Amino acid sequence: MGLVSRHLRLLFLGTALVVAAFSTGIEFLFFLAYLMVAIGLGSWLYARRGLRDVRADYRVLNPRTHVGEVLQAIYRIENGDRWGKPWIECWNESTLPASLPGRVIGVPARSTRQWLAKVTLTRRGSYRLGALRVRTGDPFGLFQSEMTVGTATNVVVFPEVVALPHWRLPPSPIDGTARANRRYEAATPLVGGVRPYVHGDSINRIHWLSSARHGELHVKEFDLEQAADLWIALDLDRGVHAGIGNEASVETAVTIAASVAMRTLSDNRAVAMTASARRIVVHQPDRGPRVEQKLLHLLANVQADGHESLAEVITATLPQLRRGMTLCLITGSTDRAWVRGLSALRRRGVAALVILLDRSSFISSEADDHARAELAAVRHALAEYDIEHRLVRRGDDIAEAIGGRVRTRG
């Protein structure tokens, strides 16, 4: 609109000068009219050839990256003309929350300029970085010349992955670490440590050297076999999440799911996932880099727009859980109905870990009495069924909250 206005003003001024010159016969007015015509024609020709023999391109160095990291792209402008280009503007239109910065540069004759553009990514998702647009114009700003080069680039921003140095899956009821009245002959050979003997431990689990050193019976604790699967259930029911932007509980839940999945895959364990968004998405247990990319792509795009209750999601997931698996449930729900659904897992030889989000903390810093009572009730229900859980509030250090050495049971 600004360029059109300038053209209209120029046309009006030129017409007025011509009319005044022919009406009065004053030579100076004829001079001004000719000068204006010359400037207009010269500016148009200058802008028209401004991008002649100019080639441009850009390349995104990391189109797959994570929240908090820096998106980088290399831009290149080549001027093959014998005349220099005093100014050339380059930019991309994109759907990124903060796009890559454009630049205005001058390119000498028969030379090349290139630079690195950066922008910090603050929101997960799939975005589109448009083709490169190049523009120049005359010194008076009367005319412009523009071209579009290259093709659009898809950029995927994965959720942040937090390092979990102390993360450890809860023991399976069949791996030799749980107190039991039955004796299970099948056990993993991976010894993780020792602990004092308790009633119900198998006699063949006693570690005699430690018992002699401590003066009392100690039994071996076993880690899960490296073949054991982890099944992550991510609750995306819109009714159990709160907050806005990067401070929303759904962002914390997605970050936790990504961190736990990547940590487990790095241990050469298979990972499966159920995400109960608008459409329930299920990935079967698998391992390796291909699975890592599939899960990260899923978590980059999910939103808290589901409508299935957590109890229904658990009921649908239970038949797929095999003996020796671990179910990691990430939710902000305080409806105790889903807790009863987990009670049958131990009898089936499936371990469970609940990562419970304090939904009220994502709304305000001070929770009301009703919210505190609901949270306490669901934690008490988990403790009744001896289901291990971790509590995460807004602003908590995720690595410490879910991967710390202290485990919460009530």
Image: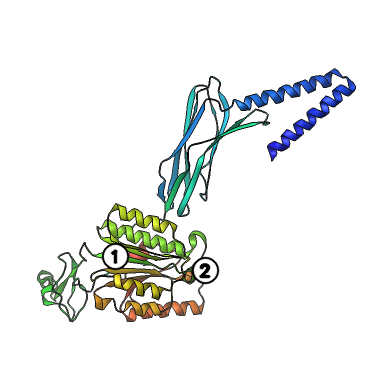
- What is the number of the mark on residue 230? 1
Q: What residue type is labelled 2?
A: Ile
Mark 2 vs mark 1, CA separation in Å: 31 Å
Residue at 23% x, 65% y is 228
Q: Which mark is residue 363?
A: 2
User: Coloured how?
Assistant: rainbow
Q: Nearer the viewer, residue 27 or 383?
A: 27
Res. 336 image quadrant: bottom left
Q: Which residue is drawn at 14% across and 72% down?
A: 214
Quarter of the figure with residue 62: top left
Q: Which residue is located at x 50 percent, y 74 percent?
A: 367
Query: Label 2's element?
Result: loop
Task: Tell me the amino acid under the disc marked 1.
Answer: Leu
**Residue 339: percent from the left, percent from the top?**
36, 78
| Residue 162 in view, yes or no | no
Does residue 329 show up? Answer: yes
Q: Is residue 50 left or right of residue 279?
A: right
Farthest right residue in view: 24
Residue placed most toward the observer, 207 or 121: 121
The x, y position of residue 159, in whole percent, is: 41, 56
Q: In which quarter of the image is the N terminus?
A: top right
- Residue 172 placed where, x, y %? 24, 71
